[in-house]
Amino acid sequence: MEKLLKCYALGIMVFVFSIANAQILPENNQFRQLGTLLPDANVYRTASGAPGFKYWQQKADYKIKVELNDENQSISGSEIITYYNQSPDNLNYLWVQLDQNIRAKNSLRSRAQSTTIKDEMSASALRYLNYDFDGGFKIKEVKDAEGNKLHFVINETMMRIDLPKPLMSGESFSFSIKWNYNVNNRALYRGRSGMEYFEKDDNYLYVIAQFYPRMVLYTDYAGWQNKQFLGSGEFTLTFGDFDVEITVPSDHIVAATGELKNKEEVLTQEQISRLKKAQTSKTPVLIVTQKEAEKAEKIKSKTKKTWKFKAENVRDFAFASSRKFIWDAMGVQFGKRTVMAMSFYPKEGNPLWEKYSTRAVAHTLKNYSHFTFDYPYPVAQSIHADRIGMEYPMICFNGGRPEPDGTYSKRTKYGMLGVIIHEVGHNFFPMIVNSDERQWTWMDEGLNTFLQYQTEQAWEKGFPSRTGGSPQMIVDYMRTNKTDLTPVMINPDIAHFHHQSQYSKVAAALSMLRETVMGRELFDYAFKEYANRWKFKHPTPADFFRTMEDASGVDLDWFWRGWFYSTDHVDLAIEKVQMFKLANGNPAETKAWKKKQNEENPVYIKQIRDKDLQTVVEKDPSMKDFYNSYDPYAASPEDKEQYKQFTASLTKEEKKFIDDDNIYLQIDVKNIGGIVMPLIFKLSYTDGTNEIIRIPAEIWRYNNNNISKVLIIKKPVKEVILDPFAEIADTDMQNNYWPPRMIQSRFELYKSKNNLNKNPMQRKRK
């Protein structure tokens, strides 16, 4: 029978390894497989997360002619759509998105919007209560390729087109639509697109998107994506080729998805020459200068020009137009290819935009490509529009405007850089890795916000990132009452705290995967594998989850369950820390230790108060006997003989355990928040040195609530810190210290700061 070796230090214990006592039911174990939460693998989507051997997707090509009326701020257009049925299904009808209908009077969104009356109402709040903007598509006609009228039914933001005969698998169908609509003033009715009016020079700046009826996505996992557009859930679209002609006032400069195909017709020779120079320039080259843009603001041509653009294998098309545009550009090299990074902005954007925008575009393309794949499109453009951030293939609309005097706050500068990086980054997710934004916002916003953080920090050390990346950024959100939270895996139109849930929480989760759970090498390889597997395709959450595990060899079901399917949070607490040493059996040492322990025990208050009390034995020494002089802590000859026998009986292994003179440090940790995470301990020793110990999350696999971990060390510990680098989004750091540490805070005397309203640049000028 194996001997039991006693340990001592803060107590006596038998040192054994065991599974935690409090077993949990399998259905509550965080490490159980996701199982039925994920769809079954099939011939279209494999269990590894890759497209299956029968994977298919639809295609839609567009030929669009659109005219922007600068006199009444409206758009009219016509298009020919050729739809390719590459599915195995026969289709009796087609669905088309009419996203502008969200702005129609009595729209589904306005009818379904909860409204209240308050004691004080702002003009903007009253404007929405008295909504009278004549928005939404006016569909003039829908015809087939032979000019025959097609029957159609408009259902809010969608239109069903009934086909004269079923569209068989492998066939295509062409049809045309004519429409018009009024462009919203973004100062009055905010939105992803619209126009901005500059009263000072009586001019308009247009950022135009969702301007044409476009095909609803049809997939193997959902059929027709028939979720109405309510505002939060963005877009899910079919890839195709675009041939677009945009007619605008002849003094307007137009930026659009795709490549400009008629430069000679719409640009001056000087502008064409500058564009050519920009291709090889290491810094942005002005194609249209501020002086030239200011001149155009004053002349206001009455004639028109048509700009022609082509784009291949894109899911959408957007454009911007204004006579106010300053335009600069520079080339970005990807092997032998040159991608043009460009910016378009009014003078109101300077000096910020001329200095930073195009450089930020170029930096984003390079950094995102490092984590995914080389940016495949020929251009990437940043358009300045006040108080907006929205993305489309090869073009995005971004805010960040200085004060009229040209000064700007730190928040404005870094907010502008952040929004440009974020919106340009959306070219990768979801413009190329084309996830379904209407169902799973996090698949583009969360992944993109994660890469935005990496890109911001690569722009400047200490970049004041506002969201994503650092787990500490989501702690306040994760502390929120559970009744107010919704899981990440939920429809964005019903998600609470939409931005924190779909952007920040996911970005922080991915950062934790990269830095703490998987490590950079495994994470980066798996993330790049996912991006390359699904570029120009339509992934689902299961494809992402499975690919990350398949390419890394790391079982992450516990992580997806906690961070994506639940509203739990991280709160790990150190409950107890104990240090033990293995007793060597020497009676002198053992009894000296017991004596020290006894001396350190609390002294009962009565004994202190009775210190002057004279006892019977003190009065009469004859009452003393053997036990009054016996020292229980002195080693007797019998003790020494037992020690001799004990040492003789030790095996070589047992003697080594004793001779090693190790300290056994037991740390008990409680999971209060619900999410299991790896344990990171910082041990501070009494000699002033430190050590970091990392324990994988699998330590919780038998008991998700409480665990104990014994560490073998050589020196006494004076402090233990759990999560010393704030890398697991722990919502309560006060219980992460042993011994407990006082957390200092402060409060301030309130004093008006009206005199500090100016930004630092303005105050410096004063």
Image (tube, rainbow, N blue to C red):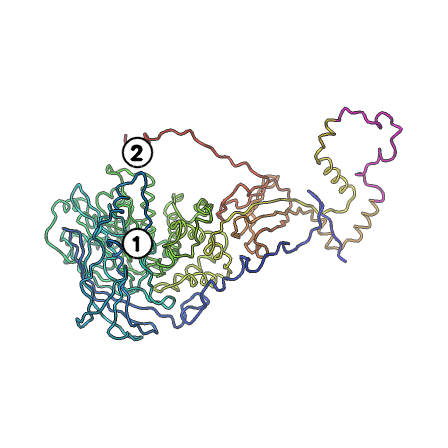
Image position of 488 with respect to 717: above or below? below
Within 10 Å of disc 1 (Cα), the crowding (few <14, some 14-19, many 20+) is: some
> From the viewer's perspective, is 111 left or right of 479?
left
Within 10 Å of disc 2 (Cα), the crowding (few <14, some 14-19, many 20+) is: some
Q: Secondary structure at mark 1?
A: helix
Between discs 2 and 1, the one toward the N terminus: 1
> From the viewer's perspective, is 66 left or right of 339?
left
Residue 68 location (% of width, % of height): 17, 55
Circle on res. 66: none
Residue furthest out toward the left: 302
- Where the N terminus falls, by quadrant? bottom right
Would residue 666 be counted in the magenta stretch? Answer: no
On the image, which quarter does residue 29 sit in? bottom right
State the residue at coordinates (87%, 35%). Answer: 626
- Residue bearing mark 1: 109
> Of the residues shown, which amino acid type is indicated by label 1?
Arg
> From the viewer's perspective, is 126 left or right of 723?
left
Measure the alpha-carbon separation of dots 2 and 1: 39 Å
Q: Is residue 31 visible?
A: yes
- Residue bearing mark 2: 758
Residue furthest out toward the right: 622
Identify the magenta region.
Answer: 610-638
Image position of 263 with respect to 93: above or below? above
State the residue at coordinates (22%, 69%). Answer: 151
Residue 702 location (% of width, % of height): 59, 57
Residue 198 location (% of width, % of height): 19, 44
- Who is closer to the viewer here, 229 or 689? 229
- Who is closer to the viewer here, 445 or 595? 445
- Who is closer to the viewer here, 494 or 49? 494
Q: How many callouts does the rendering have? A: 2
